[in-house]
Image (spheres, grey):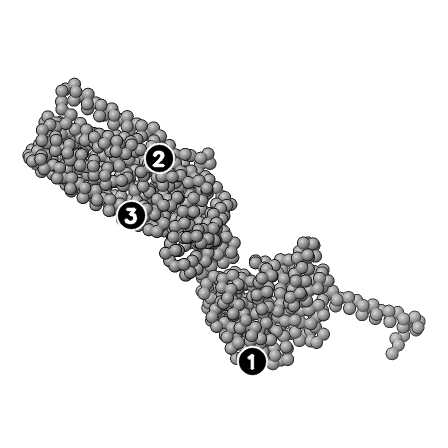
Amino acid sequence: MEPTESAAPDSRLRARLLRAPGAWLRGRRAVTNTDPGSMPQPAPGSGPCTLSTAVEPRERAWTAAPHRGTDGAATLTGTGAPVPQDTRDPLPLLPLLVVAAAAVLLGTGFFQAFTGRHALFPTGTAGWSLAVLTGLIVGHLVALGRDRWWGGTGSGGALTVAVLLLYGWVPAGMVSLTVVVLVGVARRHRWRQGLLHGAVDILGIGAGALALAAFGTAPSAESPWLPETWDLYTAPQVALVAVAYLVVTRVLLWYVHAPRTGALPTVTRTALVRQGLLGIALLGIAPLICVVAISLPILLPLFAIPLVALDSTLWIARARAEEQLRDPLTGLPNRQWLLERTWTALDDAERIGARSALMLIDMDRFRSVNDTLGHLAGDRLLLQIADRLRLALPRGAEAARLGGDEFAVLLPIADSTTSATRVARQLVAALGSPLDLDGLTLVLEASAGLAVFPDHALDAEGLLRRADVAMYQAKRDRTGVEVYESKRDSNTPDRLGLLGDLRRALDAGDVELHYQPKVRFDGQVAGLEALVRWVHPERGKVPPDEFIAIAESSGLMPHLTEYVLETALGQVAKWQAQGLKVPVAVNVSPRDVHTPGFAGAVAARLARHGVPAGALQLEITEHVLLEDPQRAADTLAGLTGHGVKMSLDDFGTGYSSLVHLRRLPVSELKIDRSFVARLAVDNEDAEIVRCTVDLAHSLGLLVVAEGVEDDETWERLRDLGCDAVQGWLVAAAMPAEETTAWLRARGSRGWQRPADLAAARAAAAGDSGAAEASNTAEHPSGQAVQ
């Protein structure tokens, strides 16, 4: 008999979750939560919900018909777990059929007893002792259960099997019915659930009675199956009765209540262990109750002690199983639960040809809260964040806490990547709202990464890892939400192999530097930019964007920067020795700028190569100020203090602002090629370039335009007041030897546009033709004039 139900085993978690407005609430109505501002409240007298189990029933179906949306998405049951629409869902009439079958079975027994003038329950001391023991068990379930003894009690089952063995199925049904009625009266808001569990218990008793009848045994209240008649061959019969009762009750309860999403492996294992313990208890305690009921019935009430101990053992096993799958602070599921639940969701999505999505959400700069206010305040803030996440979840979504300030949200069914991205943005926006902590208003931003099955991964671990990659990309770019892109993932097997090859190439000196000139509009060479190139022995030329991204996302970027600086400064020293005084620009990443001692290391390299600081220019982007502004400012100040010039690269993209221009000690600003490419045909790009040039000049900065490829763009930039250009119109990036030849060929007269050279040649040819025509007119004979 299973008239009661369970809740969270940890009283501290229960108090916490009851305070939380978005806790794992239970109730008989479904939780749709389509409005982020609304949240259902717990049913009166109910505790927080437990994690789902494989063989233990949960409220559903007839206790409350779950709301199903028209979109076929998963809905939430009273436990907070989603129940996707599935053709395997049991029929809504099944609970009614169970109750009806139990009523027919019990009514048949009563009818036979009344018509045959048989007793419904044993009389005398044995009957009263069994009644007292039944009352003690009911009191134990009602007084101590408080909604937590459901789905695994052994006390009622042991007593029921004992009465079944001794007096038959009608008295056993009376015991079960008594418990159900009394517990239902004590908990009026659970009467329908208690009625269903009582009906299942009646059917289990009927199964046990059939097992007894198969051996030719049919005990009754008048003619009990006396233990003194038992022998060695009775043991299989008793075992079969207990197994039949246990299997029928557990299977029916599971099939009626369990969601059709499959069982989580951890919960399944622990539930099977609990049911194994219950089966052993039934085999061990029930025959003892029979013996005492016949030989010394007055002692029967003492069996309440081992029966209560049995319930405690089962509950402890259940609590430990749930602790393995729950975060102890927020009450949310943990990483292990998320992985197992994701596997189940992926199986369901594959079966019906749908998509599933997994997103990881991390709170930005949460560490500063712990450092400033302490870890206790940080824990309280995490509780608020978890509650807010529950409130904002769309129907069917499930949340988990992975650790620290990192959360995960699973969408078992996702219409598309776009819809999943929209959900992620809504969650990020909800978590970004102000939080109140003891009167202190805190605003924390969140970053989310999204991975979709089957587009990005086919397994739970792969989906989690790719969502993690996208999440860190969102944190790095400050975009809020990012969808996984394989080209930005440096941890794929292919890219990991490429990373190892790049490391070996740097150690062997197989990575080359090419140099692209920057020239002013008077033709003078303003400098060179060092660009790294790598020819893989098997793959051929590897795009710089690809292997530089791999280096940036790994620990190889400092090594690559050191290699480029060392090679470039060595080449500058050679050019200086040859009389070619031209500065060289080297790109450095934000990680380099944030590396302690970077400014000193650059100064030491300059001194070792004998290169003046003015011959080196470092190109940075505004991202250097996003992670650690103070350290970046100190490093840049140290570099400029040594005489190294700074250039702001890719201006106009990312987070360009006047604040950054004011804080960065740069002397040059480079306009990104995305604005320069359409300068001649796009008036908006032309206006952006004009404003940028005016702004830079007002701040005393030089302006260099990247990506200049045609004469018309060159002329527009000249008219807008740009200081220098860089691009294929001038020259492509060249190896050091070709760059040396290019510099020597220009000499002191500098670079000239091909159009200007063609015009000069045409003019020279025209002058030569005019002179020849004049000479021919003076000397008609056509003889040449010496």
Lower position in the chain sequence, tag 3 or tag 1: 3
Residue 252: image location, x then y, percent: 28, 34
Q: Please name which of the two marks, 3 or 1, marks the residue nearer to the observer.
A: 3
Residue identifier under label 1: 610
What is the number of the mark on residue 235?
Answer: none
SS class of the residue under badge 1? Answer: loop
Q: Classify 10 Å Cα crowding around label 1: few (below 14), some (14-19), many (20 and above).
A: some
Would residue 74 be found to the left or right of residue 248 on screen? right
SS class of the residue under badge 2? Answer: loop
Report the residue at 7% width, 35% height from top: 296
Residue identifier under label 3: 10
Depth order, front residue of 285/261? 285
Q: Classify 10 Å Cα crowding around label 2: few (below 14), some (14-19), many (20 and above).
A: many
Q: Which amino acid, mark 3?
A: Asp
Lower position in the chain sequence, tag 2 or tag 3: 3
SS class of the residue under badge 3? Answer: loop
Lower position in the chain sequence, tag 1 or tag 2: 2
Report the residue at 60% width, 75% height from top: 615
